[in-house]
Amino acid sequence: MHGIIATWRMALEGIEKADAMLKEGKNASDAIEAAIREVEDYPYYKSVGYGGLPNQDGVLQMDAGYMDGDSLSVGAVCAIEDFANPVSIARKLSQGTVNNILAGQGAAQFGTEYGFEQKKMLTDRAKRIYERKKAELAQNDQLRPYDGHDTVGMVCVDDESHVVAATSTSGLFMKRNGRIGDSPFVGSGFYADSQVGGATATGLGEDIMKGCISYEIVRRMKEGMPVQQACETAVNQLDETLKERRGQAGDISVVAMDCNGNWGCATNIEGFSFVAATQHSAPVVYLAHRLDDGHTVFEKADQQWLDAYMHNHSAAVE
């Protein structure tokens, strides 16, 4: 049974496109790439692709990862600049036996060599947000880069039980030049195994990497744990460990899908949204909430929430 799940409301249009492709019998690789490209191309999402917010030097650097659950092949690009669709370059890199993860100039050289579309990805809108932040910093000298670090991550399974996971992000706003989070790293930002399922994460990459959480979820599923329980126990354990050892834990949210199309999610924050579609369910945006006992519950987002989301993301920037 086919299905696809993704982090954040921004994935909805991409999920709708992928869902239609899966219903037509297309494979998971093509569907997930098309879905993430839809997010990368949309100019009003500030944390992925075109329109993403830059680093502290005013440069937009993007990361993306891709994993094929049949072969366990992996591809990723880190800190790549001015390419329209990093996820497509990551998928291409996964097809080789070596040089699967490239960064910076090397990633750009590969993208150019294989004819991927080059495009100025820093928009005037993103520049205005950056300049406003610089002015704020000149007044109070307190950098808070962790706003708006919403990675798009997806897991997809097709009718042949082929599982694929992929991610794309522009990372933290005002990050240091060259900073890379969990998103392009296999096992942390994403993981897929067609015999089991796949998972992907979003939040503070520096903390997500400390638990290799996407691999942990798939490992628990492989040992027989239902997908929802695997998500919850992995998030709760990492959250608790970080608080015990470091005194605090950053944002951690995950979604996962097993090879039969069953899905789950978990979070340690309030306000995490995700999108899911299956063979028997049209794409739906859900809002997730973490209860005091560690369980994550979710509900369908109502139209008022959906309208407010789009208004906030497309509002004019002075």
Image: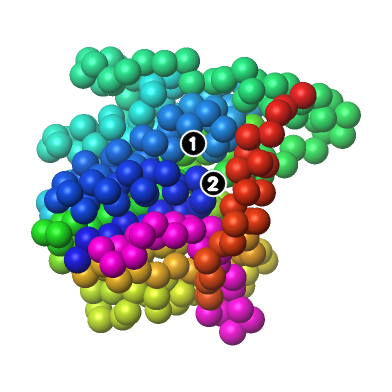
**Which comes sooner in the sequence, label 2 or label 1?**
1
Q: Which residues are magenta?
A: 272-295
Measured from the top left, where is residue 105 in percent x and y?
A: 37, 19
Measured from the top left, where is residue 116 in percent x and y?
A: 28, 20
Which corner quadrant of the image does residue 86 belong to? top left
At label 2, counting other C-alpha atoms closer than 10 Å, the crowd grade (few under 14, some 14-19, many 20 or more) is many
Most distant residue in the bottom direction: 293
Left or right? Give the position of 151 relative to 269.
left
Q: Nearer the viewer, residue 18 or 95?
A: 18
Measured from the top left, where is residue 203 in percent x and y?
A: 54, 53
- Look at the image and tell me in which quarter the C terminus lies: top right
Q: CA distance from mark 2 to mark 1?
A: 8 Å
Image point (53%, 71%), residue name: 298
Measured from the top left, where is residue 240 in percent x and y?
A: 57, 73
Q: Residue 35, relative to residue 241: is it above or below?
A: above
Q: Amino acid at mark 1?
A: Val
- Are the residues flagged by discs 2 and 1 in contact, CB closer than 8 Å? yes
At label 1, counting other C-alpha atoms closer than 10 Å, the crowd grade (few under 14, some 14-19, many 20 or more) is many
- Look at the image and tell me in which quarter the N terminus lies: bottom left
Inspect the magenta stretch and tell me whether residue 284 lies in it.
yes
Quickly name the residue at label 2: 150
Q: Give the secondary structure at mark 1.
A: loop
Inspect the magenta stretch and tell me whether residue 221 lies in it.
no
Q: Nearer the viewer, residue 94 or 307?
A: 307
Q: Is residue 139 visible?
A: yes
Q: Nearer the viewer, residue 184 or 154?
A: 154
Q: Give the secondary structure at mark 2.
A: loop
Quickly name the residue at label 1: 48
Image point (63%, 39%), residue name: 313
Q: Amino acid at mark 2?
A: Asp
Most distant residue in the front direction: 303
Left or right? Give the position of 66 relative to 125.
left
